[in-house]
Amino acid sequence: MPRLSERQQYLRQRLKSTAIATKAIRSGTQAGVEQEHNDAIYATSSFIYGSAAEAAACFSGETEGNIYSRFTNPTVRTFEQRMAAMEGGERAVAASSGMAALTSIFLGHLKQGDHIVSSCSIFGSIVGLFDNILAKLGITTTYVSPSDINAWQAAIKPHTKVLFLESPSNPLGEVGDILALSKLAHSHGALLVVDNCFCTPVLQSPLALGADIVMHSATKYLDGQGRCVGGVAIGSEVLMEPIFSFLRTAGTTMSPFNAWVFINGLETLSLRMQAHCQSALALAQWLENQPQVEKVYYTGLPSHAQHQLAQQQQRGFGGVVSFEIKGDKGAAWRCIDSTQLLSITGNFGDAKSTITHPATTTHGKMTPQARELAGIKDNLIRVSVGLEDYQDIKDDLAQALSTL
Ligand SMILES: *Cc1c(COP(=O)(O)O)cnc(C)c1O
């Protein structure tokens, strides 16, 4: 591995005490080893050694070094070190997608007979992972309402090993109490795993609140421009090792190119999140006063059921606003179809504002009963507020609402 110059070593030390915006731009970088200013993409599957003895030492783990890009790669390592610094964890493990990160977390840590207590308001594919894949291996899951701490407690069994929370949730912004859940998990010898996609490390630090593992779909805000699919888990060295061990064997590895895109995406994350939050709050406040709107879901509004808790554990409320219109599914579709600027897509966290009808897209696979239980009504619309000028986003929604 290239030796760090004195200047680089000084920077590494200094970064431990800098603000998150600085960490997002400077930490983990390998740049400067040659003379480049930006991180290079290490587009290589394998690595060479000066001698057979050097190769043997590296393969045996006696010396540190790269062997094969399914295991480690310098560009991927930069992304991992940057994410670890931003989340305040010892180590991060990057994966080929958010789902690959989750699969690696659960299969790295759990075995047959183990039990998960999970929030019922989680990303749809994770329900598929729990109910179709982990269930087949004898790992069972009980679902509870994220904000009902008594329900979490009641669902815990002697063999419960993980509590899983997404907070705030999609699309209604339900908030789980990370500090309380971490205490509950630890009093039963279980781990708290938190999906931090909606806040990003800029707005919420689950590890500092007591969570054991944080995960992200890098596909969303970390990229920020909807270019690549990726994921990452962050936590202590001890908790990351089994995840890495699973990943290097299962091959759920992040590609160096994607890591490079995410490294560059992270450089603007702090500024982007500030802008997303500002426009989303303004839009939520405006929507609350529109005659065609029945109810607005945004944790930044005092009308949100968990506004106070969100204010306590988050540093901002994020860029996703959902609202119910006065009308049925047909009216919701008409409103969506009448937008001209917003993109009709289920993705979020992009510079481009997006609009979607959760009941028939992101949550379309749920049974109508499960959807009703989750509070996802046919008149619900979700907007991921992007980085276009706020006035233009609002004007587009205003003309769409006027068709109702
Ligand atoms: C998208 C998403 C995931 C899954 O990530 P992929 O990169 O699509 O595999 C997990 N959790 C949340 C909250 C998401 O939005």
Image: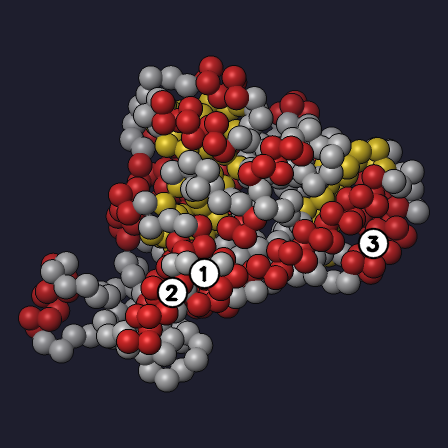
Give the vertical position of 319 relative to 270 (above or below): above
Give the vertical position of 201 relative to 190 (above or below): below
Mark whose residue sits in front, 1 or 3: 1
Contact between marks 3 and 2 (CB within 8 A): the answer is no
Q: What residue type is labelled 1?
A: Thr
Q: How was the colour assigned to the protein in this rendering?
A: secondary structure
Q: Nearer the viewer, residue 43 or 308?
A: 308
Ligand 1 within 8 Å of the CB at mark 1: no
Residue 394 is marked as: 3
Q: Residue visible at 52% across and 61% down? A: 21
Q: Residue 94: x and y, percent?
A: 39, 54
What is the spatial separation of the Cα atoms under label 1 and label 3, in whole angstroms? 36 Å
Give the vertical position of 329 relative to 390 (above or below): above
Q: Earlier in the sequence, mark 3 or mark 2?
A: 2
The reply, left or right, for residue 274 in relation to residue 223 is right
Classify residue 365 by image quadrant.
Answer: top right
Q: Residue furthest top?
A: 154
What is the spatial separation of the Cα atoms under label 2 and label 1, in whole angstroms? 7 Å
Q: Residues within 10 Å of mark 1 (few under 14, many from 20)?
A: few
Q: Residue 50: x and y, percent?
A: 13, 78
| Mark 3 residue element | helix
Q: Please state, as top left, top right, bottom left or bottom right, where the C terminus lies in the image.
A: top right
Contact between marks 1 and 3 (CB within 8 A): the answer is no
Q: Earlier in the sequence, mark 1 or mark 3?
A: 1
Residue 251 is marked as: none
Q: How crowded is mark 3: few (under 14 residues within 10 Å), some or many (20 or more)?
A: some
Q: Mark 1 points at which residue?
A: 18
Q: Name the residue under label 2.
A: 14
